[in-house]
Image (spheres, rainbow, N blue to C red):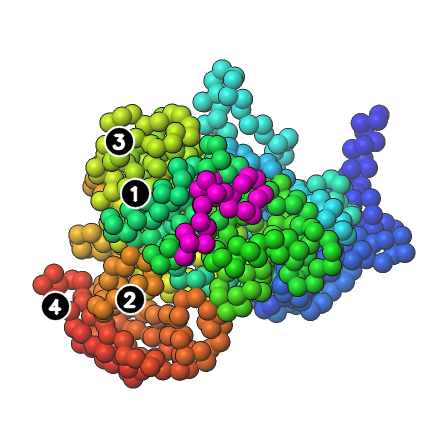
Amino acid sequence: MIRFRSLFWAALSLIPLHAMAFQIGEQPAELVIRQVSPRTVCIEIAPLDDRGQPLPMPLSSVLVAPKGTETLRVRDLADQQVQCGDLTVSITATPFTVSVRRAGGKLVQQLAITARDGSITFQTPAPVFGLGGGRQQFDRRGFYYNFANGQNLLVATHGATVPVPFLIGADGWAMFIHNPSPETDPRQAVEPWGAFDLRGEDAGAPPKLPNPRDPGYAAALKNFLTPPDPRPTIGRYVPQAASVGAAPIQIYLTAWDQPSNAMEEFVRLTGQAVMPPKWVMGYMQSHRSLGGPDEVMQVADTLRDHQLPCDALIYLGTGYTIGATGWNLGHGSLEFNPRIFDKPQAMIDRLHLLNYKVILHKNAAPFALYGASVRDAGDDPLHIANYWATHLPLMKMGVDAWWPDDGDDLPIENRLARLRLYYEGPLKDRPNERPWSLNRNGYAGAARYGAWIWSGDVIGRWETLAAHVPVGLNFSMSVSPWWGTDIGGFFPSPEYTGELYTRWFQFAAFTPSFRSHGVNWHLHTPFGWNSGGVKIEESRPLPPDSELRNAQVEPICKQYLELRYRLLPYNYTTARQACDTGVPPMRALWLVYPQDEQATKIGDEYLWGDSILVAPVVEKGATTRKVYLPPGQWYDWWTGEKSAAGWVTRTVDLATMPLYVKAGAIIPLDPVRQYTSEPVTEPTRIEIYPGADGDFTLYDDDGHTLGYRDPTDASTIWIKMHWDDAARKLTIEPDARMKAMPTAARTFDIVIKDRKDARPLRVEFKGSKIEAGL
């Protein structure tokens, strides 16, 4: 009888009784519909207090956009609808659903809101992407994603979890759920974390990760990570029970025509990415346990002597090194360790003379850092303004950037406060220099603080490398354009060899953050694999002795370093695209080819920018790589061979990671530099891949100031290029965004890629239109 009563009341909670009106949890509530943009609506569920007033939305720094224009507010459930821009929002009382449709009636998404537990059910008939960083599944359907802080599932393989409740459906919708902490004191915030259960209806209790000690662990783990077939068509957001009815929840729902629309709307809500300094587009070399001041300079000199391009050197804190061998005195310290930096000012000056940027690792920040500004603080040491003040002596010595580590357990607002600290703090002291920081975690909005995020302390295995391709793609679609990983993985394993490091290095050359870091760090340098050993053994296992005389690694790494630096004008333009549109440099094929059903299934290759397809080699001893080419014609980067769309099998040796360029592409290539600001005398080479019309707008600026924000800034260059394939003609002219013409001519050598014997055609662009026939 008791069971019957509980089932009766559970069922009754789903029925919109007029006497009870609309409820969420145990509380009466109201439903508010707002138009945010022509293609985005906000659906807010606001519990009512004892006086019948809606609880206020907690203060939060996540969103930068206003809530939008209110179009409907209801407390008594009844069938009704309202127009919001290009969308129609319909409410059905029984069962309680909110449906969003396009003009003509096509369903975008249907949400069923359960009064009892506040869960939100939605439709997933097509692949679903996003949900932040971590977990290797490209299509998120079929799995349970716990968003609780610190719930890092298989972190050694999939990377640190950076959960963000932003999803994109391949059938034309995107959804961001804003559910901030009701705690009014930001120093005491506990997030109302919940879960996304994409396992379909009646999925049952959350699955448990198999125990490595249990018999049959390998098979159980494989089953745990294998999606069901067919994929479920129903998903559900389940808020934490304690948060239901404690504060409003907002659901931002977008209808997109092209996936880039979803990226643009995400940026509208959470803020535009800031432009990185140009040096960040280069290579960064990290260190760990150091032998002393001589080794600091020896690494810097070796990179230059071997002509291995590099822009930044990163130094780990002593708390994570063997003995007192890091840059500082220990966890949380902001004082130089005299054993390593005996003359810190002179050493920083020398590194700057060698054209390196100096980046320092910093961990053990206070858990409860808070604050909306680095200027107004009072006396509280937990305020970001006061905490930033402790960094000032090092800033005055010339430290260029920071690596704030750890913080996986930080609530959202404290995460964003720390990111803001390392953006606004440097700007306070260097008001016209772009800040940059490297972070282990973040949230939606991280990109507006110049925060780049890496995948955490993963293990150096082939499985990890393979997992990181889809991990990076989903991160880029739902957190920030700026992602990377420790080249080679952080922890050693028996699988860690020169081959694995090389394959990881090739992959990282086509991710935003191009950085080597890891335990036994000498084997995380391009030149360390032919040295005969490691100078300081930080952990075992070590590779076999035969691997420590591997002469193949350095020249291959040098090849990809030089390619990264040659692609600087292409990459920097791609970075500007990310800032303006939210479309990341690292693009799932589906983002560019949404009508190609095959593209929605592929998470192990991607487009780098508009035109270059990257197919990382992630299998040990691979001699071939199967590659899917989307619609159109494609050129092999290495051989120039032309292929039609579909599957190709590319032969690979250790030096080859398959790269393809689509027909119609216009690729700018600079001469090789040793650092991104190095002057060069040879012109930029413009490579045309014929077979289709194509467009490319070259972007450039001074690389370090905030002038890029000003459309009249004389250092900001926009040069529009159009390839007319039928006429075999390239047109070069100023883009409308370039308000000031360049003071000096830009010289281009134009090459067409279907003629191996073609000589470059040299032209000078002085601000006037050029038409070059080829």
Which element carries disc 1, helix, strand or loop? loop
Viewer-side label of 4, 3:
3
Which mark is first along the chain, 2 or 3?
Answer: 3
Which amino acid type is shown beneath numbered disc 1?
Answer: Pro
Identify the residue under disc 1.
526
Point 45% across, 22% down: residue: 219
Q: Are marks 3 and 2 in contact (CB under 8 Å)?
A: no
Q: CA distance from mark 3 to mark 2?
A: 36 Å
SS of the residue under disc 2:
loop
Q: Which residue sits furthest left?
A: 757
Residue count near mark 3 (Cα–Cα under 10 Å), binned few <14, some 14–19, many ≥20: few
Residue at (46, 69) in percent of width and height: 705
Report the span colored magenta. 326-349
Residue 60 on image: x %, y %: 69, 56
Q: Which residue is mark 3?
A: 532
Under mark 3, the amino acid is: Gly
Is 53 displayed left or right of 569 in the figure? right
Q: Position of residue 626 (x, y in %)?
A: 27, 41
* Residue corresponding to mark 2: 679
Closer-to-camera residue (379/446): 379
- Which label number is shown at residue 759? 4
Residue 369 colored in magenta in the image = no
